[in-house]
Amino acid sequence: MAGRRGGGRADARARAGRRKKRSKVKIGLGVAVSLLVLTTAGAGWIYVKLDGNIDTFGADGISGDRPPASDKGANILVIGSDARTDGNSDLGGGSKGDIGRSDTAFLLHTYADQKHAVAVSIPRDTLVDIPPCRLPDGSWTTGQHNTMFNEAYSVGQSAKGNPACSQNTVEKLTGLRVNHTIVVDFKGFAVMTKAVGGVQVCLPQDVYQKDLNPHRATRGERIFAKGPQTVAGQRALDYVRIRHGIGDGSDIGRIKRQQAFVAALIKKVKSDGMSPTRLLPLADAATQSMTVDPGLGSAQKLMSFALSMKSIDLHNTKFVTLPWRYQGARVAIVHPDADALWAALKADRTLDGQDAGGHHNKQAATSPSPGATEQVSGKGISVTVYNGTSVTGLAARAADTLKDHGFTVTGTATARSHHQNTVITYGPGRKDQADTLARLFPGADVQQSPAAAGISVTLGTTYVNGAFTASPPPTTVPSGVADGARSADDDPCANLSYG
């Protein structure tokens, strides 16, 4: 009996233990479910909050005459705006009724392998062609020739600026489709640097108040000491805005320091970890003063876009400046160096010529000259020929070839800008004729323009020795561009000024 009573007590204890264990399991499961619900609800609340922060600009300002879409990486235009509204005047000075201006811009190309990226800075004073852009009243401007790049953002004279016009201009300049455009103003920039706990920068020399504001009568106090230091908020803004008193005082030198700053910011974010928990405070800070295209117009899209770049290595994140030279007080683009750079990005090739997307354009590399092997009937098709290269007489030679195929050449002229690739432009109702012409131009971009009355062909550098051929993508960009590149893991004190 005693044994049975002892056994009964043991059984009871075992049953109680099993009940207690099941209770713990139930409690643990309940806590897990509760945490999941709370986490999901919290994330939902955060996304709603971020969605409320984000401003978008209208897609109706994007040109209908765009480069073709590509699966060879993505291109993101990033614009730094010094609009003086919404608290920015306290950080940058100026009138609260001032128009939006862009002093900083770079085109970020992320490669298809999601392991490489290159940011190409476009100097604000670069002379470019600005295509027709939409005004606030819905009308469109006429194109502008040989105009400073930062004028595109100011088209329409609005406080919010005109990011769509800047995007149109970059697409015309590069021949690359811009997948997304992001505008960050002074206020948002300052808050972002605080959100990450400051960014390490370096100064090549002591900097004084007069260096930041050359209109001062005296040198003023020292605001930065020579050497490395951590900056955030207003001091971060002062660092990226300094132009005078360092190097030759040019915008080119400032671009080098801005590249170093962005590299340091990326390094800091990656070192902190690119998890949603880490990114949300930064995203909250960024979206408060950010304007994006409709494709990034929600928190979910913006966060997904940011997380898609988490595998890009710091050493494989490069910064370069558009090949340039001084033209008086302005900046002129150096051809064909710039053309080779855009061609490399279009082919998804890194600065050292590596294919970072696994794409190979075998057809472009092996296509013979159709002019020599194929007879194309151009009867009844009129074409105007433009020379988009620096080779004298190229348009005339192309015109002769077109005439041999029965096309009517209505005229030849020099294009306003250089082209790497040949471009065929056609007006409404002329697509079939343009496609016939395109048989003589393997790899040419064929684009419709509502404003075009007929058909034109602008010869790029792929036109060689009077034959229409599609050349393989360049294996490397010019050494002057590649050798001057900065990596995100470079010494922050290296290569900080020009002149």
Image: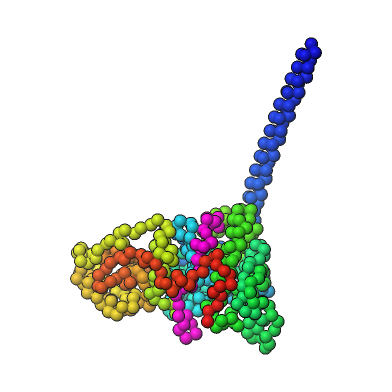
Specify the quadrant of the image occupied by residue 406.
bottom left
Q: Residue at x 69, y 39 (%)?
A: 31
Q: Residue at x 71, y 33 (%)?
A: 24
Residue furthest right in the image: 2
Q: Residue at x 63, y 67 (%)?
A: 199
| Residue range of the region highlighted in magenta in the rendering | 306-331
In the depicted structure, whether residue 259 falls above or below residue 273: below
Q: Nearer the viewer, residue 206 or 312?
A: 206
Report x, y in % for residue 295: 51, 59
In the depicted structure, whether residue 379 falls above or below residue 308: below
Report x, y in % for residue 365: 30, 62
Colouring scheme, one of rainbow, by chain, secondary structure, one colour? rainbow
Answer whether residue 186 is visible to the viewer in this image: no
Q: Is residue 271 magenta?
A: no
Report x, y in % for residue 302: 56, 57
Residue furthest top in the image: 1
Q: Nearer the viewer, residue 446 or 382?
A: 446
In the depicted structure, whether residue 117 falls above or below residue 384: above
In this rendering, would 134 be left or right of 397? right
Q: Quadrant of the N terminus?
A: top right
Q: Is residue 319 magenta?
A: yes
Q: How many marks?
A: 0
Report x, y in % for residue 352: 42, 65
Residue furthest bottom in the image: 217
Answer whether residue 28 is visible to the viewer in this image: yes
Q: Residue at x 30, y 59 (%)?
A: 363
